[in-house]
Image (spheres, rainbow, N blue to C red):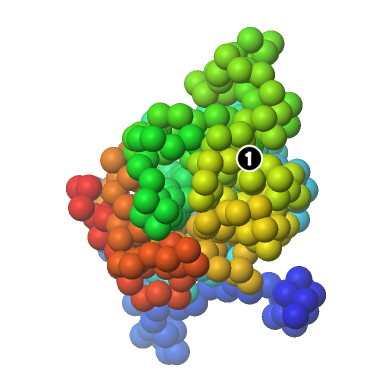
C-alpha cells in the first residue's frame, strides 16, 4: 500500500486531520450568557487575582503547543514552516488519540533563534506545555535551554529527548536478549544532530561509557577544527570513517537520515550478536534483511512494516499526560531515565523481534505518565 498517497488523499478529503471541539454546548441565550458575557467576567476576575487559577479555569491545564520552524522536518530537511504543518497536525492528533491531551499546531515563519525564543515566551501563557518539533541543531539546543529557564511550564524537544528515551528502552531489552552489559559495550552513533546528541547524553547517563559519535565527515575527532560545543562533548582522539568506527562495536544506532550507509560487511565487522537500530525515515541506514545477512542479532527501525519499531509516539503522549496532570515544570535526566526504563519493562519477556511495545499497547501511556508523575 502506498501510505504517502493515501495520506495525501485523506488530508485533501478532510482538509487536514485536526480540528477544535467544544466541551459544552451553546444552544440558547442562557448558554451564551453563561459561557460568554456576562458570565465570563467571573473567571477573568478570579485569574487576575490568582494567575495560578488559569490551570483550573481554562484549557491551559490540558493544552500543549506543538511548535516548529520547519528547519529539520523528518528526513526532508529544511522545508519551511508551511510544509512542516502536516507533521505538527499529526503530532497533535497523536497527543489527543493516545493520551487525551489537547494540542495546537503552530509553525513560525522565522528561523532566527532570538525571534523564536521571544515569540514562544510571548505565547506561553496560553499553554500548559511546549513541544518543540523539527528545529535544526545546533539552534534547537539553545532554544530549548533558554525556554526551559524562562518559562514556568515544561518545554520538551521531542526530536532530542523522545528519540533518546524510546531508543534507550529498546536498547535495555536488546541487551537482555543478547546477554550483554551496558558497561562493557561499544556504541556507534551515526548522526550528531539533535537526536544523536541527546541520545548520547542520556545513554551515557544510563551508564554506557564507550560511545563513538560520527557525522557526515566520519568519527568526530577532537583535533578537528571548528567543532561545535555539543560535538566537543563527545569527540574522541581518533580519526576514521563510519566503517572504521564499527569495527568491534556492539551497537549501531542510525540517526543520520542517510539511507543505505551500512552494508552487511560492515555489520560483520562488529562484535558477535550486534544490535542494529537503523532509524532513518522513511529509508533506514540499512534494511533489515541486509543487516540480518550480516549477522545482526537484533534489528530495529523507525518503520511500522518491520519488527521493533522505535517510534517517539511511545513517549510524548504519556509524557505530556504526566507533566500536565502533576503540574511538573522541568524535565530532568532522572525523569527521562525513569520513563525509558518503565517503557522497557512493559515487555516482560523480550525477544529478538520484540524489544519494544506497540504504540497501541494500552499500558504505554499509563506507564509513561506514571513514571513522570513519580518525579514530583
Q: Which residue corresponds to the image point at 68% horizontal and 63% vertical from the top-left?
A: 289
The reply, left or right, for residue 167 in relation to residue 341 is: right
| Element marked by disc 1 | loop
The reply, left or right, for residue 99 in relation to residue 55 is: right
Query: Farthest residue toward the bottom?
Result: 27
Answer above or below: position of 291 versus 236: below
Image coordinates for residue 154, horizontal then vertical, percent: 38, 45
Image coordinates for residue 83, horizontal then vertical, percent: 75, 56
In this rendering, does residue 66 appear at all? no
Residue corresponding to mark 1: 269
In this rendering, does residue 263 appear at all? yes
Q: Residue 109 versus residue 262: which sits nearer the camera?
A: 262
Image coordinates for residue 342, horizontal then vertical, percent: 30, 57
Q: Residue 75 versus residue 138: which sits nearer the camera?
A: 75
The reply, left or right, for residue 367 in relation to residue 35 is: left
Q: Which residue corresponds to the image point at 51% horizontal and 37% vertical from the top-left?
A: 187
Image coordinates for residue 90, horizontal then vertical, percent: 60, 66
Q: Could you tell me which quadrant the N terminus lies in?
A: bottom right
Q: Which residue corresponds to the image point at 55% horizontal and 68% vertical from the top-left?
A: 307
Q: Which residue corresponds to the image point at 36% horizontal and 54% vertical from the top-left?
A: 176
Amino acid at each position: 500500500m502506498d501510505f504517502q498517497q493515501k495520506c495525501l488523499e485523506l488530508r485533501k478529503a478532510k482538509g487536514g486531520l485536526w480540528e477544535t471541539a467544544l466541551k459544552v454546548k451553546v444552544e440558547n441565550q442562557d448558554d451564551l450568557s453563561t459561557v460568554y458575557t456576562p458570565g465570563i467576567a467571573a473567571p477573568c476576575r478570579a485569574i487576575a487575582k490568582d494567575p495560578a487559577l488559569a490551570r483550573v479555569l481554562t484549557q491551559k491545564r490540558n493544552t500543549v503547543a506543538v511548535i516548529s520552524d520547519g528547519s529539520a522536518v523528518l528526513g526532508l530537511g529544511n522545508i519551511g514552516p508551511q510544509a512542516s504543518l502536516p507533521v505538527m497536525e499529526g503530532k497533535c492528533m497523536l497527543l489527543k488519540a493516545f493520551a487525551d491531551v489537547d494540542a495546537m499546531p503552530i509553525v513560525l515563519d522565522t528561523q532566527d533563534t532570538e525571534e523564536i525564543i521571544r515569540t514562544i515566551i510571548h505565547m506561553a501563557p496560553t499553554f500548559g506545555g511546549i513541544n518543540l518539533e523539527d528545529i535544526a541543531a545546533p539552534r534547537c539546543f539553545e532554544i530549548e535551554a533558554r525556554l526551559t529557564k524562562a518559562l514556568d511550564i515544561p518545554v520538551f524537544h521531542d526530536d532530542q529527548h523522545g528519540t533518546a528515551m524510546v531508543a534507550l528502552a529498546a536498547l535495555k531489552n536488546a541487551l537482555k536478549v543478547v546477554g550483554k552489559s551496558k558497561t562493557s559495550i561499544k556504541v556507534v552513533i551515526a548522526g550528531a544532530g539533535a537526536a544523536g546528541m541527546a541520545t548520547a547524553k542520556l545513554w551515557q547517563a544510563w551508564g554506557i561509557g564507550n560511545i563513538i559519535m560520527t557525522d557526515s565527515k566520519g568519527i568526530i575527532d577532537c583535533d578537528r577544527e571548528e567543532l561545535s560545543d555539543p560535538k566537543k562533548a563527545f569527540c574522541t582522539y581518533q580519526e576514521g570513517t563510519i566503517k572504521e568506527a564499527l569495527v568491534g562495536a556492539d551497537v549501531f544506532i542510525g540517526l543520520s537520515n542517510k539511507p543505505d550507509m551500512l552494508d552487511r560487511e560492515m555489520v560483520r565487522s562488529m562484535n558477535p550478536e550486534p544490535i542494529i537500530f537503523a532509524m532513518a525515515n522513511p529509508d533506514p541506514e540499512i534494511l533489515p534483511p541486509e543487516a540480518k545477512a550480516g549477522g545482526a542479532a537484533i534489528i530495529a527501525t523507525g518503520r511500522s512494516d518491520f519488527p521493533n519499531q522505535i517510534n517517539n509516539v511511545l513517549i510524548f503522549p504519556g509524557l505530556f499526560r504526566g507533566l500536565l496532570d502533576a503540574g511538573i515544570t522541568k524535565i530532568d535526566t532522572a525523569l527521562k531515565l525513569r520513563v525509558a526504563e518503565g517503557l522497557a519493562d512493559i515487555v516482560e519477556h523480550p525477544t529478538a523481534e520484540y524489544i519494544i511495545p506497540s504504540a497501541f499497547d494500552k499500558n504505554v501511556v499509563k506507564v509513561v505518565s506514571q513514571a513522570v508523575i513519580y518525579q514530583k
